[in-house]
Amino acid sequence: MKVHRGDEVVILLGKDRGRRGKVKKVLPRKNVVVVEGINIVKKHVKAQGKQPGGILEIEKPLAASKVMVVCPHCHRPTRVAYRVEKGRKLRVCRHCGSLLDGGENAR
């Protein structure tokens, strides 16, 4: 997947279009991401044992195709390019050419 945990993303479609947030969780098999503060829904929960019931607000997953990575250097939404250096595949910004990984998340 081109989106990794910790990336800042902008939402392209849906009720939260245009908002930015940080990726909290990535589920590559389902091709979805969970973004902090985005796609909030209310869930009605029945009391179980000592846990009280009520209405919870939770973050639901979004399709990865509905988000776009924001470059940390030029602060623009960008498509992801790849560059191979020293046998590692690195993600690169298409606008400014800077690394999106910072090197530590590179595979």
Image: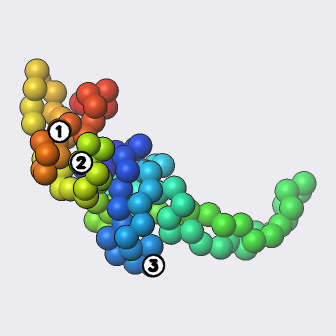
Q: Amino acid at mark 1?
A: Ser
Q: Secondary structure at mark 3?
A: loop
Spot the residue most to the bottom.
Answer: 15
In the image, is residue 82 above or below residue 51? above
Spot the residue most to the top.
Answer: 86
Pick the quarter of the image with the C terminus. Answer: top left
For label 2, the residue is 74
Q: Secondary structure at mark 2?
A: loop
Q: Are marks 2 and 3 in contact (CB under 8 Å)?
A: no
**Quarter of the image holding residue 51?**
bottom right
Q: Position of residue 10 (x, y in %)?
A: 35, 62
How much space separates mark 1 and mark 2, taking CA atoms?
9 Å
Is residue 90 visible in the rendered image? The answer is yes
Q: Position of residue 1 (x, y in %)?
A: 26, 49
For label 1, the residue is 98
Q: Residue at x 40, y 44 (%)?
A: 5
Spot the residue most to the front.
Answer: 74
Q: Secondary structure at mark 1?
A: loop
Q: Amino acid at mark 3?
A: Lys
Q: Amino acid at mark 2?
A: Cys
Q: Earlier in the sequence, mark 2 or mark 3?
A: 3
Q: Residues within 10 Å of mark 1 (few under 14, many from 20)?
A: some
How much space separates mark 1 and mark 3, taking CA atoms?
31 Å
Q: Earlier in the sequence, mark 1 or mark 3?
A: 3
